[in-house]
Amino acid sequence: MHRLTHYRLCPRSRSLRLAAGELGLALDAVEQEPWAIGPQFLAVNPAGELPVLEISNGPILCGIYAAAEYICCDLETSGDSHTPPLNLFATDPEDRAEVRRLTDWFHNKLDREVTRELLFEKLYARMKKEGAQGPNPEILRVARTNLKYHLSYISYLSDQRAWLGGDQLSFADLAAAGHISTLDYLGEVSWQDYPIAKAWYQRLKSRPAFRALLEDRVPGMPAIASYPDLDF
Amino acid sequence: MHRLTHYRLCPRSRSLRLAAGELGLALDAVEQEPWAIGPQFLAVNPAGELPVLEISNGPILCGIYAAAEYICCDLETSGDSHTPPLNLFATDPEDRAEVRRLTDWFHNKLDREVTRELLFEKLYARMKKEGAQGPNPEILRVARTNLKYHLSYISYLSDQRAWLGGDQLSFADLAAAGHISTLDYLGEVSWQDYPIAKAWYQRLKSRPAFRALLEDRVPGMPAIASYPDLDF
């Protein structure tokens, strides 16, 4: 079985778990706390970043870019068949470019402007014992302001299309969902202000691949009550 | 002809110009100053990021991820033939994963830890008239310390392999070169400390695709004297 090294609230890891679920790919998952990355992990991925996916009798894929493209675009030839085949990076090159543009948007822009900051301030810093004085209110304020802009963008895209990247479910949806589900866990998403984005998230949340994520909990940092609810 | 919107010292734009050069793809280039991005540019790429590549009779590719994958992997079917065909993302899936891991390393990790900071402090802030008091010495110090680590990593990779991503020239080399060439322009690379990385850069610098980059100059911010020299 393929072996995933992830952290339960890591948005990039979450998007890979969702993709594996959609593709019917079973993963043997082990956790690595992002605030406690040491020499053993760095020997595998010197970038010090999650996720890492070790393909059974195959390569070790470091980081979401290499791992997502590999399991979605390259692994299909290896005998994992689906009916109908699910291509999370689209088949048409122009559609694929749009999926990649949005994947980059969520995994880099949204990550940098919102998720990374909120995860660090609210969780990782505390776990590292660096945040004895609590989160920095100015960083929280900026990240929350940025999040409004991103939720509006998700609403805009969902209003134009069946899914964020186009007519079909794509890795762009899963990348977005990796971040939004973590932000929802932390109680950062004011769903009542974004009904269209909410409808998009509701559809994703109802998919079987999402179930495992909705069961994740962090000791000492409970999820908001509506986190696992399909009707939220 | 395809139309590239770039900035001359933008590392991601540079890697795309190099890839286009290697692939024999002619581009009609227009500049967008990164410190002066306005509504007109945002209407095309709401992420506000360079490069943007408008494919003739084709899609508009926003950002380096979508643009590089498209011209290297998807555009080849459209009649641009090469002998032998140059595949900058490798043909074997495992090799391709390694090219993508390193592309992500240079365009995201090196960018975040070094190039973005130095470009902003030394050039963009001044152009925006935000840096009247000059660069922040603490930010410069941290970015320069980080750069040492990245140059060591380039040395390590070059010592193991013919090119950074493997046996063949790949987009990983061009991504790295996009950043290193900008840092070299700014006089930030102490080549005498990194002879193996220097030999790698020398080989790249000698390629015809590199010539246009070596002619770039920013008014009011001269390149170091050895910037265009193949023997530096």
Image (cartoon, coloured by chain):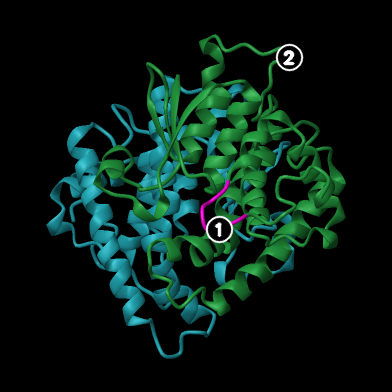
Chain colours: A cyan, B green
Q: Quadrant of residue B208?
A: top right
Which dot marks residue B111? none
In front of the other: label 2 or label 1?
1
How many residues crowd mark 2 within 10 Å: few (<14), some (14–19), many (20+)? Answer: few
Residue B65 image position (x, y, % from top left) = 50, 39
The segment highlighted magenta reads B217-222
The amino acid marked with disc number 2 is Pro
Nearest the eye: B5 or A90: B5
Q: Chain of mark 2?
A: B
Residue A154 image position (x, y, % from top left) = 25, 46
Question: Does B216 lie within the magenta span?
Answer: no
Q: Tell me the CA gap for discs 2 and 1.
A: 40 Å
Q: Which residue is mark 2?
A: B84
**Could you tell me which residue is drawn at 82 percent across and 46 percent down?**
B158
Disc 2 vs disc 1: Cβ atoms closer than 8 Å?
no
> What is the quadrant of the C terminus of chain A in the image?
bottom left
**Could you tell me which residue is drawn at 62 percent across and 23 percent down?**
B23
> What is the quadrant of the N terminus of chain A in the image?
top right
**Could you tell me which residue is drawn at 62 percent across and 11 percent down?**
B81
The amino acid marked with disc number 1 is Met
Q: Residue furthest top?
A: B79
Residue A34 image position (x, y, % from top left) = 56, 67
Residue B143 in the figure: left or right of residue A119: right
Q: Which residue is mark 1?
A: B221
How many residues crowd mark 1 within 10 Å: few (<14), some (14–19), many (20+)? Answer: few
Q: Quadrant of residue B169?
A: top right
Image height of B135 relative to B88, above or below: below
